[in-house]
């Protein structure tokens, strides 16, 4: 290179490295790659998969694990006794296979989204048979296709320490045996999927997470099959507990995997979100993903949806993609956290 060419080239290189880095081109950021060896996931929904082009484009590119948002819940998959409708859940499972992504099953034992026949007049013996049959048929159908299953969802009480488990059909019929029953039935069908207990309000160190901690510690001591705990992480703006990582760590130290299973950050009063609110939201996403990345046994971060227009939270704009599926500051903050940056760069 001649001297006359060399100097301007050198100068522009020097200037480029001194200038603040421009916003990276989002087309070149693939969160599922940055998350490796962890998984980056989304709740997937058949209402939009293949029906909303931009949604389908984002979901096909960015994620390595999926949870069906509703399609495997009892009311949808076994609406009548022993009559199963696997169609919608199958659609998500096939989609995941087609892009080499994993699946989290969701869920078997929960107080919500139950069909009336389960939630009413069965005797304890009948409900026990129904539970075992449900778990067995669903796990048989998806044998070899599920990486993990939220066997138990939201069963810890909100009135700890006075009460351990929530009052619902399961605890009404089985008392404290409810949760071990579901886990034992699941393990008996298939030893491969990681069996999870999943809950909300257990993200920080508090009375509810202490209760969860004691419950799972007791299960491990008693030989109840359990592989992992899922932390939902439905947060409002600036509500990420500062001890999230320490809390994940104490569960991991019991020998369990941990996962962020339903992350979203509801803007609440800051809806629809000016630049300041979106930057705070991004910071909150960074905090959660960073807590997972800092925990050896944290295997995945799953966001509960993809874009704000299809979120389960109306008027919350809680997700990393906006209504028109453009990446928000939260998207770049997730990338930063997976890359190990000490704070969001935007
Ligand atoms: C929500 C879905 O997102 C909604 O579409 C549905 O109407 C209600 O359930 N905790 C859970 C998820 O474990 O299954 C819930 O999903 C959100 C709260």
Image: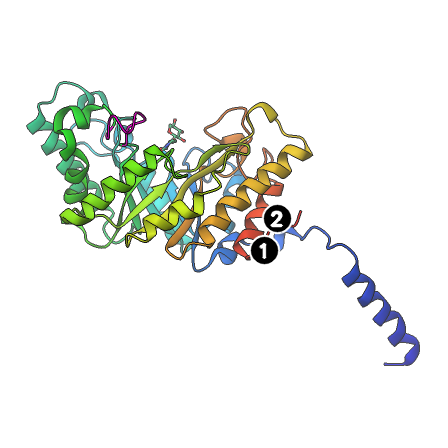
Image quarter for ligand 1 equals top left
- Could you say which is closer to the camera, residue 81 or residue 342? 342
Residue 255 location (% of width, % of height): 28, 54
Q: Residue at x 54, y 27 (%)?
A: 316
The label shown at residue 122 is none
In the rendered view, does 176 fall on the left or right side of 45? Answer: left
Q: Residue beneath label 1, please?
A: 341
In the rendered view, does 2 fall on the left or right side of 19? Answer: right
Q: Is residue 271 visible?
A: no
Residue 89 location (% of width, % of height): 32, 39
Query: To which quarter of the image does residue 295 belong?
Result: bottom left
- Could you say which is closer to the camera, residue 18 or residue 222? 222
Q: Residue at x 63, y 36 (%)?
A: 278
Q: Which residues are magenta?
A: 156-165
Q: Secondary structure at mark 1?
A: loop
Q: Is residue 163 above or below residue 280?
A: above
* Circles 2 and 1 in contact, beta carbons < 8 Å: yes
């Amino acid at each position: 290179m001649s001297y006359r060419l060399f100097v301007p080239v050198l100068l522009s290189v020097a200037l480029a490295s001194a200038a603040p880095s421009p916003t990276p081109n989002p087309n070149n950021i693939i969160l599922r790659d940055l998350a490796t060896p962890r998984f980056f996931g989304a709740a997937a929904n058949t209402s939009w998969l293949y029906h909303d082009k931009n949604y389908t484009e984002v979901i096909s590119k960015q994620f390595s694990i999926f949870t069906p948002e509703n399609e495997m819940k009892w009311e949808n998959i076994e609406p009548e006794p022993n009559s199963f409708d696997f169609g919608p859940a199958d659609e998500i499972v096939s989609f995941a296979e087609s892009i080499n992504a994993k699946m989290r099953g969701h869920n078997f034992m929960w107080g919500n989204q139950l069909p009336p026949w389960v939630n009413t007049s069965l005797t304890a013996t009948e409900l026990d048979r129904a539970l075992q049959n449900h778990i067995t048929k669903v796990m048989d159908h998806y044998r070899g296709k599920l990486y993990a299953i939220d066997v138990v969802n939201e069963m810890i009480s909100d009135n700890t320490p006075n009460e351990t488990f929530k009052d619902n059909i399961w605890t009404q019929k089985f008392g404290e045996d409810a949760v071990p029953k579901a886990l034992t039935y699941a393990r008996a069908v298939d030893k491969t999927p990681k069996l999870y207990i999943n809950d909300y309000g257990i993200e920080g160190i508090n009375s509810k997470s202490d209760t969860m901690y004691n419950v799972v510690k007791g299960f491990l001591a008693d030989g109840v099959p359990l592989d992992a705990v899922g932390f939902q992480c439905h947060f409002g703006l600036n509500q990420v507990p500062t001890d999230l990582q320490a809390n994940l760590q104490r569960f991991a130290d019991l020998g369990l995997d941990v996962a962020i299973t339903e992350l979203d950050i509801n803007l609440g009063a800051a809806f629809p979100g000016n630049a300041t609110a979106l930057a705070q939201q991004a910071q909150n996403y960074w905090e959660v993903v960073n807590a997972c990345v800092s925990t050896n046994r944290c295997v995945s971060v799953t966001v509960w949806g993809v874009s704000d227009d299809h979120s389960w939270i109306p008027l919350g704009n809680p997700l990393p993609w906006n209504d028109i599926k453009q990446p928000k500051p939260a998207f770049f903050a997730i990338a930063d956290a997976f890359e190990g940056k000490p704070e969001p760069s935007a």
